[in-house]
Image (cartoon, rainbow, N blue to C red):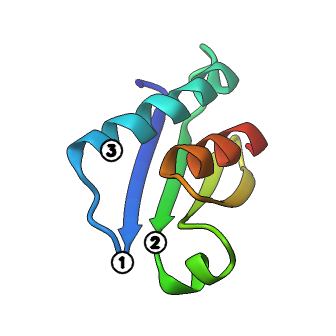
Amino acid sequence: MDAMHITIKATRHELTDGMRSFIEEKFSALDKLVGTTGVPATLSCEIDQSIAVERAGAKYRAEGNFSIDGNLYRAEAENATLEGAVDAVRDDL
């Protein structure tokens, strides 16, 4: 991931090395948007597991902010699984 910098934050949940690797792997698909242009890109991802999210019928909330070439793209999703929430955010971005 030379062209894209990824920052991951976990709220009310411990971020394990396995989770970090999974999230980085999923969002590496966005590298194709960066291409070989050399334009710097950043992705900030926040993972949340809370009672408020569970009351909404999900267990995890994922939020992603993808910045490239002066443009900011944002997506948010809730799902029963971390994988489902991250996949939905990646697909929206």
Which is more foreground, mark 2 or mark 3?
Answer: 2
Name the amino acid, label 1: Arg
Crowd tier of the residue under label 3, counting other residues whose Cα lies within 10 Å: few below 14, some 14–19, many 20 or above: some
Measured from the top left, where is residue 66 in percent x and y? Answer: 64, 48
Name the amino acid, label 2: Gln
User: Which residue is rendered at x = 52% and y = 32% of the image?
Assistant: 26
User: Which residue is rendered at x = 72% and y = 56% of the image?
Assistant: 75
Sooner in the amino-acid sequence: mark 1 or mark 2: 1
**Placement of 14 over or under 25, stated as above or below:** below
Sooner in the amino-acid sequence: mark 2 or mark 3: 3
User: Which residue is rendered at x = 36% and y = 77% of the image?
Assistant: 12
* Secondary structure of residue under mark 3: helix
**Placement of 49 over or under 17, stated as above or below:** below
Q: Which residue is mark 1?
A: 12
> Between marks 1 and 2, how big is the CA–CA gap?
6 Å
Q: Are marks 1 and 2 in contact (CB under 8 Å)?
A: yes
Q: Which residue is mark 3?
A: 20
Sooner in the amino-acid sequence: mark 1 or mark 3: 1
* Secondary structure of residue under mark 2: loop
Q: The C terminus is located in which quarter?
A: top right
Q: Is residue 55 left or right of residue 51?
A: right
Q: Which residue is mark 2?
A: 49
User: Which residue is rendered at x = 37% and y = 66% of the image?
Assistant: 10
Residue situated furthest left in the rendering: 17
